[in-house]
Image: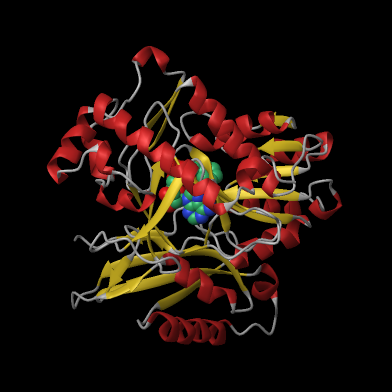
């Protein structure tokens, strides 16, 4: 079901006009009301009247994470303090606190964006949503909550953690949609298996997973364990939280709610806008936000956009599943490596689980050394004829050919790598650089 066909299936040219009108309004408002943006625009010698087409957005200044740090907490506020209805904050992956202040209208828009997201996975008012994203300052919990409410579904506000209780609730209330981080979904599946619960026999049929990088391999694992369809959902606190983009039932790229959030892809080195289809840094401008609207916010997330039509009937631009972040990118002996590449490479290797940890250090020769800890499947570990040495060599060879660097593989027993109820940690960088 398309939650809001008027906007989600809108004619492309009509949408462009709407985006332009919203961008123009936003630029005028920011110039008038937010000294930070007035200064930035003046520095570039650009005035709101210079924005005569959507393409003119490239004349406007970027907003960066550093800008948010320097103006913390309310330096970018575009409304009166009394209009703020709710605030959220994320320490993000880099530890810089970012704030999102929502007016009443912002919460309505967020609810709509998340209702579209749940509907994208096939959710309807008849569903029971077990929401295990953390409630609190993190946007996952309340974002999914508001979306489920706007959809008219029954919502079970679990928050994350207390896995035994999650499993009990899942069985007793007959939850049909699960919302949590993909790593927590896998963790719950392991606990269920241990408790002798066959998740496939439960009414749970769909899951909306995001907030951290995951792969097709993890999707397959989750779908197999639960007997469900797993969908990728994307968002970030700075822009609104979850609800920025989501997969539909076709599962081929994430539809961006582009009437609300205008996307661009830039070259992270030069800041130049790249042609559609090229991979680069994702940048968003919030087109309707009132509390903390952002102009050309550099997300540091790496992906590409595509405009080919989708059989679901939505006409919105799609972004590819994220490749990684410009700031998570590891530079190992001068080679750029994204943790997601390692995960992708693990997909092809039978006998391993998608639980891994990358430990980077400087060796005695001052060269970077990478240890990749990989969990071996339970069946494989207990198999009498197991060939752990062979598996280790195989992983090392595959990594070398895919990443162009040598990686030392350490096979570890099932369940040794720390599990997370929220976002998982995949990299430990011990280098003092
Ligand atoms: O993680 C919002 C969210 C909540 C999204 C629930 C989806 C579901 P932050 O804590 O501000 O907000 O972290 C945002 O997480 O810039 C990405 O690097 C990463 N991220 C979010 N969704 C995905 C995804 C929430 N589907 C940062 N795949 C973003 C990969 C993701 N990374």
The image's colour scheme reads secondary structure
In percent of width and height, residue 187 lies at 63, 52
Residue farthest top in this picture: 82
x and y percentages locating residue 332 in the rendered image = 29, 73
Q: Is residue 179 left or right of residue 41?
A: right
Against 422, is 343 above or below? below
Quadrant housing the C terminus:
bottom left
| Res. 431 image quadrant | bottom left
Depth check, front residue: 433 or 288: 288
Which quadrant holds residue 409?
A: bottom left
Give the residue displayed 67% in from the left and 68% down from the top. Answer: 378
Residue drawn at (61%, 67%) of the image = 217
Image height of 34 relative to 331, above or below: above
Q: Position of residue 125 (x, y in %)?
A: 78, 34
Q: Residue at x 20, y 33 (%)?
A: 38
Q: Nearer the viewer, residue 350 or 387?
A: 350
Taking the view exactly as shown, the residue that stands out farthest to the right is 201
């Amino acid at each position: 079901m398309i939650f809001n066909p008027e906007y989600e299936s809108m004619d492309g040219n009509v949408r462009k006009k709407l985006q332009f009108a919203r961008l123009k309004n936003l630029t005028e408002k920011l110039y008038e009301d937010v000294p930070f943006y007035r200064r930035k625009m003046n520095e570039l010698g650009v005035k709101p009247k210079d924005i005569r087409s959507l393409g003119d957005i490239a004349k406007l200044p970027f907003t960066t994470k550093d800008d948010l740090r320097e103006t913390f907490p309310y330096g970018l506020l575009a409304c009166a303090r009394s209009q703020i209805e709710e605030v959220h904050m994320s320490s993000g992956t880099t530890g810089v606190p970012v704030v999102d202040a929502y007016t009443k209208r912002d919460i309505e828009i967020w609810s709509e964006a998340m209702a579209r997201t749940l509907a994208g996975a096939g959710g309807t008012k008849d569903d029971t949503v077990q929401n295990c994203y953390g409630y609190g300052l993190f946007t996952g919990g309340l974002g999914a909550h508001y979306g489920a409410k706007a959809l008219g579904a029954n919502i079970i506000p679990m928050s994350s953690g207390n896995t035994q209780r999650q499993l009990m609730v899942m069985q007793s209330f007959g939850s049909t949609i699960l919302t949590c981080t993909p790593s927590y979904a896998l963790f719950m599946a392991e606990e269920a298996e241990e408790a002798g619960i066959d998740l496939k026999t439960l009414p749970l049929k769909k899951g909306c997973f995001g907030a951290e990088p995951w792969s097709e391999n993890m999707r397959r694992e989750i779908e197999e364990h639960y007997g469900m369809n797993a969908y990728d959902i994307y968002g970030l606190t700075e822009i609104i939280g979850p609800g920025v983009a989501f997969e539909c039932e076709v599962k081929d790229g994430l539809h961006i709610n582009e009437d609300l959030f205008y996307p661009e892809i830039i070259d992270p080195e030069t800041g130049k806008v790249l042609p559609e289809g090229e991979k680069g840094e994702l940048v968003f401008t919030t087109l309707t936000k009132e509390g903390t609207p952002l102009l050309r916010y550099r997300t540091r997330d790496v992906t590409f956009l595509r405009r080919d039509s989708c059989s679901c009937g939505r006409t919105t631009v799609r972004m590819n599943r994220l490749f990684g972040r410009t700031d998570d990118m590891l530079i190992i002996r001068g080679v750029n490596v994204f943790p997601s590449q390692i995960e992708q490479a693990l997909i092809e290797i039978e006998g391993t689980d998608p639980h891994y940890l990358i430990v980077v250090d400087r060796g005695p020769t001052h060269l970077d050394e990478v240890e990749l800890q990989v969990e071996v499947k339970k069946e494989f570990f207990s198999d009498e004829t197991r060939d752990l040495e062979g598996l280790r060599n195989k992983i090392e060879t595959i990594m070398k050919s895919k990443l162009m660097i040598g990686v030392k593989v350490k096979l570890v027993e099932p369940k040794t790598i720390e599990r997370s109820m929220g976002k998982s940690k995949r990299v430990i960088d011990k280098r003092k650089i």
